[in-house]
Image (cartoon, rainbow, N blue to C red):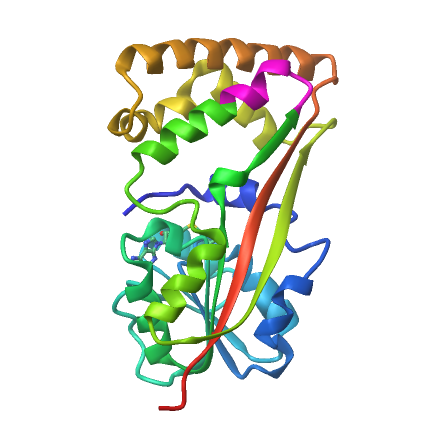
Amino acid sequence: MREFSESYLERTREGMWADSRAALEPLALDARDRILDVGCGTGELSRVLAAESPGEVIGCDADPDLLSAAAEHVPVVAGDALRLPFSDDAVDLVVCQALLINLPDPAAAVAEFARVSTDLVAAVEPDNAAVEIDSSVDAEGDLERRARRAYLDGVNTDVALGADARTAFETAGLEVLATRRYDHVRTVEPPYSEGELTAARRKATGDGLADDRETMLAGDLSEGEYDALRGSWREMGRDVIEQMRDREYRREEVVPFHVTVGRISES
Ligand SMILES: C[S@@+](CC[C@H](N)C(=O)[O-])C[C@H]1O[C@@H](n2cnc3c(N)ncnc32)[C@H](O)[C@@H]1O
């Protein structure tokens, strides 16, 4: 199972859903009694669900450390998305965010969600192949594109699933009611947060890229190409830090998320 740190999830979800929750409308949150957020991580989505719904929201994740952070916001239960520790028809909505992209068989997870829900199943999944970067450091956008392409080539799950989650729903026998797109825009500008400064330092040391080295080498990238990419990456990171010192660094990242909502069929 791919691991995520608490700080990574908090940083990458910061501000998500704050500007618009229109894409969540098909989940009919105001009419829900009991919602299960599977792969809840630190509970970033669980909190949004709890704010929008009068019903109870329960978080579930396989990682006990992340789950203890989520427990500060909602009740939690440890469990595997493919064998949920809930009886049939236990809730009226099962939802996940950025979980299916990490699973080798997304349709099997959606089928398990359908077992536990009486009414709706929803997935909020990014298309990581369509991320766009605009940075005041010229090289950053191109280097991130190259690193992302190498990662996508080597990773063994569909991290660009996005709108294609519909296929997993249909394979699991669900009727797809609606699909919506939500663009999560992440802006870095002065004053920089502690998390943004840490992320910049990880660029300059190459540590961030090194975390994905094995995945990248599992694709088409050779060791020599990886080393060259890491060299340019570190140089770019040093430019980011220099611009930050002068309070000139600005970056905008747009991550497209796709919301897919399905209904449990009557039969
Ligand atoms: C990218 S994170 C998303 C976390 C959260 N939904 C969010 O959007 O902030 C993926 C989460 O899925 C969890 N996860 C991965 N495989 C799982 C599985 N088989 N069963 C339950 N949780 C799983 C991970 O521990 C992690 O918390």
Compared across the picture, whether 200 is left or right of 40 comes to right
Q: Is residue 178 visible?
A: yes
Percent of width and height locating residue 51: 64, 68
Residue lying at 32% horizontally and 27% vertically, measured from the top left: 216
Percent of width and height locating residue 147: 43, 25
Percent of width and height locating residue 82: 27, 65
Quadrant assignment, res 253: top right
Please determine whether, in this image, residue 174 is positioned above or below residue 256.
Answer: below
Magenta segment includes 140: yes
Please determine whether, in this image, residue 251 is positioned above or below residue 40.
Answer: above
Please determine whether, in this image, residue 3 is positioned above or below residue 188.
Answer: below
Magenta stretch, main secondary structure class: helix
Residue lying at 30% horizontally and 82% vertically, measured from the top left: 87
Nearer to me, 147 or 91: 147
Q: Which residues are magenta?
A: 135-143
Quadrant assignment, res 54: bottom right
Please determine whether, in this image, residue 19 is positioned above or below residue 112.
Answer: above
Compared across the picture, whether 105 is left or right of 181 comes to left
Q: Quadrant of the C terminus?
A: bottom left
Magenta segment includes 141: yes
Residue lying at 37% horizontally and 31% vertically, measured from the top left: 151
Compared across the picture, whether 76 is left or right of 261 comes to left
Residue lying at 38% horizontally and 83% vertically, measured from the top left: 90
Q: Residue furthest bottom?
A: 267
